[in-house]
Image (cartoon, helix red, strand yellow):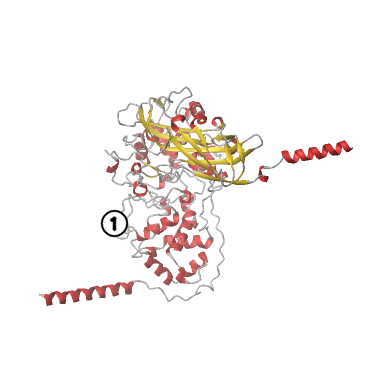
Amino acid sequence: MKNLSVFVAIFSLVSLLGCQDAEDLPSTDFTINFKATYGGETLEKNKDYIFGSYPIFFEGCRLYLSDIRLVNAEREVIISEIEYLDFTPENAASATPAILFKNVPEGDYTSVSIGYGVKPQLNAKRPSNFPAGSPLSIEIDYWAGWKSYIFSVLDGKADPDNNGTKNLSFSYHCGSDAVYKIFEFNVPIKVKAGQFTTADIAFDMKEFLTNDDGSLYDMVANPATSNDATNVVVAQALTAHWGRATTITQ
Amino acid sequence: MKHFLQKNAIILVSGLLIAFMAMEACRPQDPDPVTGDLEQIPYNPQSYTIPKPSFFPEIPIPADNPNTVDGVQLGRRLFYDPILSADSTMSCSSCHLPEGSFTDNKKVSTGIDGIAGKRNSMSLLNIAYVTDGFFWDGRAPTLEAQALAPVEDPIELHNDWGTVVAKLKAHPTYPSLFRKAFGIKDRSEITKELAAKAIAQFERILISSGTSKFDRFVEGDVDAFDDEEIDGKLMFFDEGAQYNLPDAQCFHCHGGVTLTGGKFFNNGLDSVGNLNEFKDLGRFLVTGLEFDKGKFRATTVRNIALTAPYMHDGRFETLEEVIEQYHDNGFGVANEGAFLNQIGFPVGNGTYTGLTEYQKKALVKFLHTLTDTTFIKNPDIQNPF
């Protein structure tokens, strides 16, 4: 009986420690500065960049992120379930949204996990299911044909002939559950009030349009995600590039 | 000579003085403000739940201007009342008539002085969902800000808000309506901002009924559409690949359940040598961004069959002309929308087949399924006078 009591006491203590909720830890506000870039330079709408051997510009660059997590050996903290980033808003050449996350548990995290797109549980719904102002109430980035949000948008024009006219329009609209992808980045992130309260995440569109072997995505052959079966193929191929196209720093 | 000039100067100054006094005499004077003259009128604001189809998104309502029953009624009255114009001949509704889905079906609108504006009257259907700015160029950030502008526009109602507010204060009915809508204590508290808030509240109730053929089909009534309409829908929303139908690319700019994109595009209307040659610089006048020259807001296509003529300058009389224009893929101007030259099946190297005559016809037929006669006949949005 005595042994049982000791066992129960130890078990309870271990359980209590093990179950220490992230909410019990000291926490602080934490800001992530998001940015879209091209070759490391902040991406601007309608500005000429060089893609391989020819000029290119972007008209639209938007992205949904799901379940942004800070991870270490003790815990995983979801600091955001869904975010919508519009890097090319209607009223400016570019935007670098800084998003404040409240009550982030302090700690030394070893990695960051990000879902690119809208996670399936949320993607099963549609804009009318969400309150006005929610990132998921935005209608222009929902496609009823897919029954899916458009996870990422990259629109623009290119001049592959180098004849002075950008007559190739490209539009990569990636979406549907089959395209949703989670990447984990092994980056140390410290969260501590007054000391470590920000981090930067940049998404590079040149890397997004670069294949894993270093070759450039064949924009001429595949200028768009179309509505046939190749849509998922093109969208999956491009979404696979987010891991390389993402840089997280603190 | 000197004496002659002095004499004429005196006559001129006297004339101006008399003219000024006459103008002032004609201008409605603020009644002597009596503090609390409206307090005996009950102020019991009741929230107005805007009717909307269940499959429509929640309507964005600003925290500082929630819809109330009395606010909407006041706004409706102001919207239809020519008291807003300098000569009391025109109101908001003169250019936004219910039967035209709140357009005037004219190429461009004409104001009280008979001067034609340069842009077509926009439909106000589902205007509450617009978030990126009102007017064709998006220059008004809110519906409240938008409602202020036409009153003082010299080619629209050509009035000044000082005069309007004075008339409203002196009016036998309006002070009590403002009291009921906003709880003001006396008529001196009537302002242009409150008037604009009321008008915005009314405009926010201009929501589709959800009973168009399109809505019935989407909500499960498969018999609502014939085959041609189905083909048109599949092409409009780029859903037709498995039925061997091409993409018409329409929904990229007219997307979502409200078909109200709200974003700004150069949709390939004009061939210009450079962006400065656009006759109307559109969105550029607001943002100053070079590539916004010649861009305009994409309107809702719900009730599009009722809102002819089309485009910001009303240049097209028919939907057939509109489809043909898009089908021509624009002119290769640098800032034309990317989807303009992706219409049809892809055939490689960034080129597309375009649409057949049947496919264009099916698209037009589909656009007609968006007609919502229940909305335009809704008694709650008609002229109350």
Residue B290 in the image: above or below residue B349: below
Say what amino acid the circle numbered 1 marks. Answer: Ile
Percent from the top left, x then y, of residue A210?
45, 27
Residue B209 in the image: above or below residue A171: below
Image-based side of B327 in relation to B231, left or right = left
Q: Residue furthest right?
A: A1
Percent from the top left, x then y, of residue B214?
49, 41
The quarter of the picture where residue B92 lies is: bottom left
Percent from the top left, x then y, of residue B106?
34, 51
| Chain for numbered disc 1 | B
Q: Residue furthest top?
A: A213
Residue B38 in the image: above or below residue A249: below
Q: Is residue B173 visible?
A: no
Q: Residue furthest left?
A: B1
Residue in the foreground of this view, choosing between A179 and B215? A179
Residue placed under numbered mark 1 in the picture? B115
The secondary element bearing badge 1 is classed as loop
Q: Quadrant of the N terminus of chain A?
A: top right
User: Residue drawn 31% across and 35% down?
Assistant: B331
Q: How many marks?
A: 1
Percent from the top left, x then y, of residue B355?
39, 31
User: Residue drawn 42% across and 75% down?
Assistant: B31
Residue in the foreground of this view, choosing between A119 and B146? A119
The quarter of the picture where residue A65 lies is: top right
